[in-house]
Amino acid sequence: MADIAGLLAALDGIEVSTDRALLRQKSRDFYWYSPILKAILDGKAGELYARPKDEAEVLRILAACRAARVPVTTRGGGTGNYGQCVPLEGGVILDMTAMAKPISLTDGVVDVECGMKMIDLDLWARDQGWELKLWPSTKRTATIGGFVAGGGAGVGGIAHGTMRERGNLVGARVATMQDPPVVLDLEGDDASPVNRTYGTTGIMTRIRLPLTPAQEWRDIAIGFEKFTDASAFALALAFADGIPKKMCAVFDSQLPPFFRAIADSVPAGQSLVLTMVAPSGLRALRDLARDHNGTFLVEQSTVEAERDPDKTPFYEYCWNHTTLQVLKKDRGVSYLQCRFPFEDTLAAIEAVRVPFRDEVWMHTECVRFGGRTTMSALPVIRWTSAERMHEIMAAFEAVGIGIANPHVLTIEEGSNYRRVPGDQLGFKQRTDPLGLLNPGKMRDFVPAETTPA
Ligand SMILES: Cc1cc2nc3c(=O)[nH]c(=O)nc-3n(C[C@H](O)[C@H](O)[C@H](O)COP(=O)(O)OP(=O)(O)OC[C@H]3O[C@@H](n4cnc5c(N)ncnc54)[C@H](O)[C@@H]3O)c2cc1C
């Protein structure tokens, strides 16, 4: 147990709480998608909630926690899927959502406080003619700090790859757990150790990101009698350099009935493609759909839909929202994250979709990795047991499909192809020698300093 009374005295003037209901609520994320993680994480909670309003308060909190040897688990929107912001060893929950202002936008680079919601950041940039290159399907609830530290893939991936591509993170200001805690201003490759390391290597206070010129994206739903036609169409769209697009997802016919606002528009038994395309590409998209036996079913403005709380932008049926849409009606499913080979991509999808069709409902997303285009997938999987989930993963891997296992807690075990290059372990040994930042999430870390408090 941490010395909460001592911490409260040291944090005088900062927004803090010991309310148990609040602590329970702020110690959770969406780990419950995984029955394996649910069994491990249910009931874990922090002991003190702190919500700093600026960098100086972050440093005060870190200094007090270091002095008292209290762990700190950072939290943005709390939408992570792998228990990234669930404290394994109690301590302080550091909520970054009061630090939510844009600082500047110059030459297409935005400098922003990391607790800002991504939707707010995108709409702010859009007013100046720019938009985010990448966002998760949780854009309306997630923070930019949480996306960089805990996510990193999603809408925009068909054009810009993931956050692990060099250049997609320009820089960050990072508060450390050294003696005393300091703020480092990191640029380029030097910022990689805080990219997708679950807040184990430092607390980002500000982030600099490259933007891209804003487009009036159209959400388009296209139906196909055959999954293979839908899949071939999607990959052809991904490779169609003349058609500006932000997203393209494919769903086997079991899934569209779970997509509330469009389910009635998709004929029973059809596979579905949901895509976001710029107005200039719409005619070419129709021609491409015709060549693959696709029928336009629904069209709407993405930006109008995301500004309206009663509407659903199509990206909220894609990426890991697909699983959520099914879970809303059927708690008996879970999911996987995988990436198909760059060559013979469609054949690899069929090699697992067909034999497992009763329990694996295929959902793929077009994405670029290292300059090459392929498809990743978040298939919805009928849950039977952990053993069965591991059998399915092994069967996928046997045909050359990479798995980023979403049923594990540590960066090393879960990342696979999503791991950001760089010496994250060496960086943590310098910035968090006591191992107080989100302990238990970096498997290979051994504390360098072992002096008791
Ligand atoms: C329905 C659904 C759909 C999703 N779709 C996607 C998707 O398309 N793409 C994707 O990448 N992810 C997706 N996710 C996962 C998650 O929503 C995103 O990764 C999101 O960007 C996380 O942001 P957050 O603010 O909620 O982070 P949190 O969950 O609060 O935190 C995530 C991690 O980042 C750390 N962290 C937060 N802020 C900071 C900071 N300032 N400094 C250092 N560490 C910090 C936390 O400690 C934690 O380890 C999805 C999740 C759900 C539930």
Image: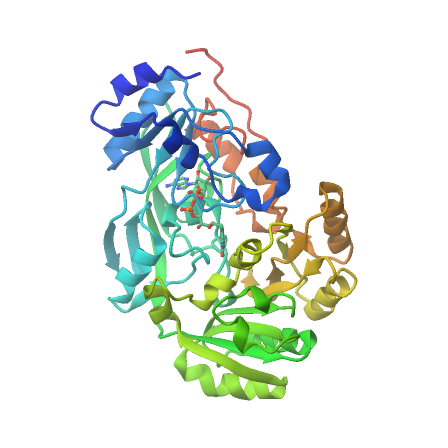
Q: State which quarter of the image contains the N terminus.
A: top left
Considering depth in this image, is 361 or 98 the residue closer to the camera? Answer: 361
Residue positioned 40% across, 39% down in the render = 75
Q: Where is residue 378, by image quadrant?
A: bottom right
Query: On the rendered structure, is 405 left or right of 368?
Result: right
Considering depth in this image, is 367 or 303 the residue closer to the camera? Answer: 303
The answer to whether any part of residue 256 appears in the image is yes
Residue positioned 39% across, 27% down in the render = 20
Q: Colour scheme used in the picture?
A: rainbow
The image position of residue 40, as x and y in percent, is 60, 32
Query: On the rendered structure, is 410 left or right of 174?
Result: right
Q: Where is residue 263, by image quadrant?
A: bottom right
Task: Give the vertical position of 157 relative to 88 (above or below).
Answer: below
The image position of residue 56, as x and y in percent, is 24, 32
Query: On the rendered structure, is 204 left or right of 273?
Result: left
Residue positioned 47% across, 69% down in the render = 261
Q: Exactly how many numbered labels are in the figure? A: 0
The residue most toward the top is 452
Task: Give the vertical position of 453 relative to 162 (above or below).
Answer: above
Query: On the rendered structure, is 426 left or right of 392?
Result: left
The answer to whether any part of residue 155 appears in the image is no
Q: State which quarter of the image contains the C terminus.
A: top left
The residue most toward the left is 13
The image position of residue 379, as x and y in percent, is 64, 58
The image position of residue 401, as x and y in percent, is 70, 57
Residue positioned 61% across, 61% down in the render = 376
Task: Give the vertical position of 236 relative to 104 (above or below).
Answer: below
